[in-house]
């Protein structure tokens, strides 16, 4: 597998599928060979801007590219890939196991109320090399199978049930992370330095994005120069620091347009825009449509699939 370049990192919902808007609460479960066999068992570097992925290898091996690190896993192992992280895989031809892709924001919303300690495990990428006799191992596959059933049923409440099952799955993975790393310090999970820096940037961005802080503000908070921060973002995420800031604003704007009834003018003010006309131009530039048109289209889509 070739190391990814700084440009043109594809953004997918599922590898090979064009990415859709980050406000979707959808989830999907499939089996690793279904997609990887189509690409000769090699999934090139890409990212999911709004989706978390969890892979559980029950057979085979994987070479796992995560941001600027190259990791190796042998079944049984679990990989957690939060949204925004560049990742790729080279699987052995005998690989087997499920992979679930789901809205990270929906999961975080429930976790923040039900188990705030879980947020660290949701937001921190990891490859866990497991042992067959480990505690909690037997609870993984039943949860994946239940997720598969819900993803295919489209029954009433299947999205809510899927999110609840994913929460239960992440709790089991969180328990195993603590079992393997009793300190519970996520920075000790052998993450590369650049990945830890990106996570710090994202944490600062989550705190301050509504106040329209500059790249220099975030760089100062990280103890680096704006140029260094932007180069770091290009190396790890394939986009500039300013693009990361703008993407966070757009993601929040989309979420608010769907899940609240705030007028565009009020939403613009809450996102730090002094003028709603400027906000509308900003939104159109990054999404190709006005806020009102986006809201109408998204609500129509959600209503038709309800």
Image: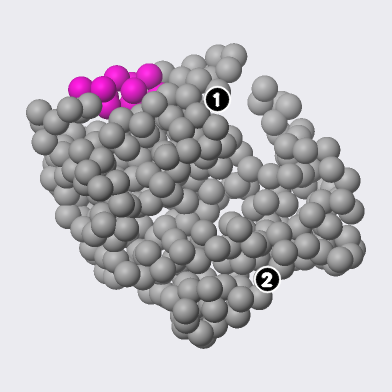
Q: Main secondary structure of the magenta part?
A: helix
- Crowding near pointer 1: few (<14 within 10 Å), some, many (20+)? some
Residue at 32% across / 69% down in the picture?
Answer: 193
Do we see residue 150 in this rendering? Answer: yes
* 143 part of magenta stretch: yes
Q: Which residues are magenta?
A: 138-147
Q: Nearer the viewer, residue 291 or 104?
A: 104
Name the secondary structure under disc 1. Answer: helix
Query: At x 61% / y 58%, what residue is drawn?
Result: 207
Residue in the picture at 83% in, 38% down: 261
**Vertical comparison of 78 with 133: above or below:** below
Judge from the rendering whether residue 235 lies leftward or rightward of residue 179; answer left or right: right
Coordinates of residue 231 in the picture (x, y in percent): 46, 80
Residue 243: x, y in percent? 60, 70
SS of the residue at dot 2? loop
Which residue is depicted at the point 76% across and 35% down? 299
Q: Which residue is denoted by mark 1 in the rendering?
A: 159
Separation of marks 2 and 1 at Cα, in angstroms: 35 Å
Residue 191 covered by magenta stretch: no
Left or right? Give the position of 195 relative to 64. right
The foreground one among 288 and 215 is: 215
Rendered location of residue 46, percent (x, y): 41, 58
How does the figure colour the protein chain or chains? one colour
Instruction: Determine the residue located farthest toward the top in the rendered image.
Output: 156
Rendered view: 167 above or below 255: above
* Residue 43 % position (x, y): 32, 54
- In the drawing, does residue 144 fall left or right of residue 305? left
- On the rendered image, what quadrant is the C terminus found in? top right
Q: Pointer 2: what residue?
A: 213
């Amino acid at each position: 597998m070739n190391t990814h370049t700084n440009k043109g990192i594809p953004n997918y919902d599922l590898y090979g599928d064009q990415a859709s808007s980050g406000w979707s609460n959808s989830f999907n479960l499939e089996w690793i060979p279904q997609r990887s066999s189509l690409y000769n068992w090699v999934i090139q570097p890409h990212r999911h801007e709004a989706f978390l992925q969890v892979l559980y290898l029950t057979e085979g091996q994987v070479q796992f590219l995560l941001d600027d690190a190259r990791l190796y896993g042998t079944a049984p192992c679990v990989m957690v890939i939060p949204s925004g992280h560049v990742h790729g895989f080279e699987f052995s031809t005998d690989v087997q196991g499920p992979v679930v892709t789901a809205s990270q924001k929906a999961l975080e919303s429930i976790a923040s109320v039900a188990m705030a300690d879980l947020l660290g495990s949701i937001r921190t990428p990891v490859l866990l090399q497991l042992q067959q006799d480990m505690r909690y191992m037997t609870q993984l596959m039943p949860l994946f199978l239940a997720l598969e059933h819900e993803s295919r049923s489209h029954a009433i409440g299947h999205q809510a049930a899927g999110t609840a099952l994913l929460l239960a799955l992440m709790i089991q993975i969180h328990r195993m992370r603590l079992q393997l790393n009793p300190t519970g310090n996520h920075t000790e999970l052998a993450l590369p330095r650049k990945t830890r820096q990106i996570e710090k940037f994202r944490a600062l961005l989550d705190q301050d994005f509504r106040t329209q802080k500059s790249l220099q503000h975030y760089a100062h908070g990280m103890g680096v120069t704006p140029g260094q921060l932007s180069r770091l973002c290009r190396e790890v995420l394939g986009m500039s620091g300013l693009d990361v800031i703008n993407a966070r604003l757009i993601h929040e704007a989309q979420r608010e347009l769907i899940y609240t009834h705030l007028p565009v003018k009020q939403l613009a003010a809450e996102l730090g825009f002094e003028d709603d006309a400027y906000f509308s131009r900003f939104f159109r530039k990054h999404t190709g449509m006005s806020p009102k048109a986006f809201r109408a289209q998204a609500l129509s889509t959600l209503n038709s699939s309800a």
